[in-house]
Image: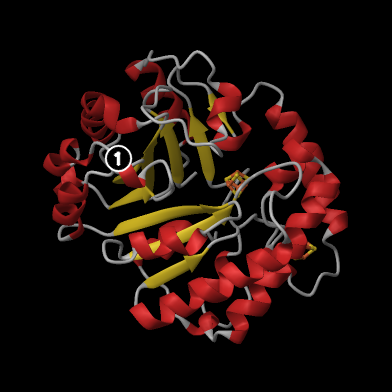
């Protein structure tokens, strides 16, 4: 396990429409058990030299005291590991992150219609001089490039993914249009874009991955999600009790479904959480969008972009 997504609190100060968290955290629990989460992370270690912990939520900046505690506790408990830390935030309370900037690897900030009016722009400016800022955008239709444009002056990297939904809330051709516009903006700006869509290979050069049964996100092997009570789940989208069994079943089905696909060495069955949560029809729709993504990034010559420190954190090859 190389990457831990750790929930610091279930509470959030915004209610973004597409946040999956609303499905699970109806009570917005603010409990946190430092001992339990430290033990849970410790139990996942299996000799790897470095581990990245991404502070997650809810909104982790509501409880930066806990972030500090974890950043102190893990290196004390496991001094041989090179610990790297990152914060995934909605950007509204970035002043509280500034004192920790030297000890963070990168900051991931959500840009959307809810976060933009509340964004702590001065603190974002200050942080952008100190560490990589990854702008995190979720495509759900609508005026997507508005958020891309808002992010670009501040972010060193822009990564964007598709909303997770049982039925696509947009027409595929609208997605293609957004892809073209976004890739055009990337080319103009010189910024590094990570056209995410679970297709990491887009940022990794023209070579396919070595034959691998791993999923691009590392689920089931390199990745774990730990909640505020120290419970472990396959990923943050699969933080419910039966997730592990359903994931095991989905992995078997995807093995068959993706067999023989020409994009398999790049896409590697994309996001199994879509299959687990929304079923095979939804997965097929997302698969179609993945093909579209590959067409567009290839047409834009994007596949040749060099890997960088942030896309490396996205990458979890064995
Ligand atoms: S493009 Fe579709 S069929 Fe091919 S590997 Fe990805 S999800 Fe599977
Ligand atoms: S299964 Fe999907 S949602 Fe979960 S970590 Fe992988 S890509 Fe992300």
Q: Using the rendered view, name the quadrant where residue 241 is placed.
A: top right
Q: Position of residue 202 (x, y in %)?
A: 56, 73
- Please indicate whether residue 68 sits to the left or right of residue 261 in the image: left
Ligand 2 closer than 8 Å to label 1 CB: no
Residue plotted at (48% across, 79% down): 184
Name the residue that disc number 1 marks. 118
Q: Is residue 229 visible?
A: yes
Vertical placement of residue 127 versus 26, above or below: below
Q: Position of residue 135 (x, y in %)?
A: 38, 56
Scheme by which the image is coloured: secondary structure
Vertical placement of residue 113 versus 208, above or below: above
Residue plotted at (57% across, 68% down): 178
- Please indicate whether residue 237 sits to the left or right of residue 254 in the image: left
The picture quadrant for ligand 1 comes to: bottom right
Q: Using the rendered view, name the quadrant where residue 117 is placed.
A: top left
Vertical placement of residue 24 versus 173, above or below: above
Count of labels in the image: 1
Residue plotted at (48% across, 41% down): 46
Q: Nearer the viewer, residue 138 or 216?
A: 138
Q: Using the rendered view, name the quadrant where residue 139 is placed.
A: bottom right
Q: Nearer the viewer, residue 20 or 273?
A: 20
Mark 1 falls on what kind of element? helix
Q: Position of residue 97 (x, y in %)?
A: 19, 40
Q: Nearer the viewer, residue 232 or 92?
A: 92
Report the quarter where the C terminus lies: bottom right
Q: Nearer the viewer, residue 169 or 163?
A: 169
Q: Residues within 10 Å of mark 1 (few under 14, many from 20)?
A: few
Q: Position of residue 154 (x, y in %)?
A: 26, 61
Q: Is residue 306 visible?
A: no
- Please indicate whether residue 155 sits to the left or right of residue 257 in the image: left
Residue plotted at (65% across, 55% down): 214
């Amino acid at each position: 396990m190389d990457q831990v997504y750790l929930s610091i609190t279930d509470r959030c100060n915004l209610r973004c429409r597409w946040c999956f968290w609303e499905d699970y955290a109806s009570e917005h629990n603010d409990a946190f058990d430092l001992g339990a989460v430290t033990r849970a992370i410790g139990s996942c270690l299996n000799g790897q030299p470095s581990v990245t912990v991404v502070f997650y939520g809810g909104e982790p900046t509501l409880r930066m005291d806990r972030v500090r505690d974890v950043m102190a506790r893990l290196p004390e408990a496991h001094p041989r590991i090179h610990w790297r830390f990152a914060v995934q935030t909605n950007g509204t309370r970035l002043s509280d992150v500034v004192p920790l900037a030297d000890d963070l690897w990168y900051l991931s900030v959500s840009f959307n219609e809810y976060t933009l009016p509340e964004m702590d722009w001065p603190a974002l400016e200050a942080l952008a001089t100190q560490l990589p800022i990854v702008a995190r955008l979720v495509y759900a239709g609508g005026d997507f490039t508005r958020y891309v444009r808002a992010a670009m002056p501040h972010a060193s990297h822009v990564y964007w993914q598709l909303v997770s939904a049982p039925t696509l809330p947009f027409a595929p051709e609208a997605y293609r249009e957004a892809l073209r516009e976004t890739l055009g903006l990337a080319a103009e700006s010189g910024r590094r874009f990570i056209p995410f869509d679970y297709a990491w290979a887009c940022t990794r050069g023209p070579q396919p991955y070595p034959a691998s049964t791993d999923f691009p996100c590392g689920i089931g092997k390199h990745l774990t999600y730990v909640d505020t009570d120290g419970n472990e789940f396959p990923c943050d989208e699969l933080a419910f009790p039966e997730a592990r069994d359903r994931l095991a079943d989905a992995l078997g089905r995807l093995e068959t479904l993706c067999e023989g696909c020409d994009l398999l060495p790049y896409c590697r069955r994309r996001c199994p959480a879509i299959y687990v949560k929304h079923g095979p029809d939804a997965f097929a729709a997302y698969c179609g969008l993945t093909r579209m993504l590959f067409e567009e990034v290839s047409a834009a010559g994007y596949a040749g972009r060099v890997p960088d420190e942030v896309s490396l954190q996205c990458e979890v090859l064995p």
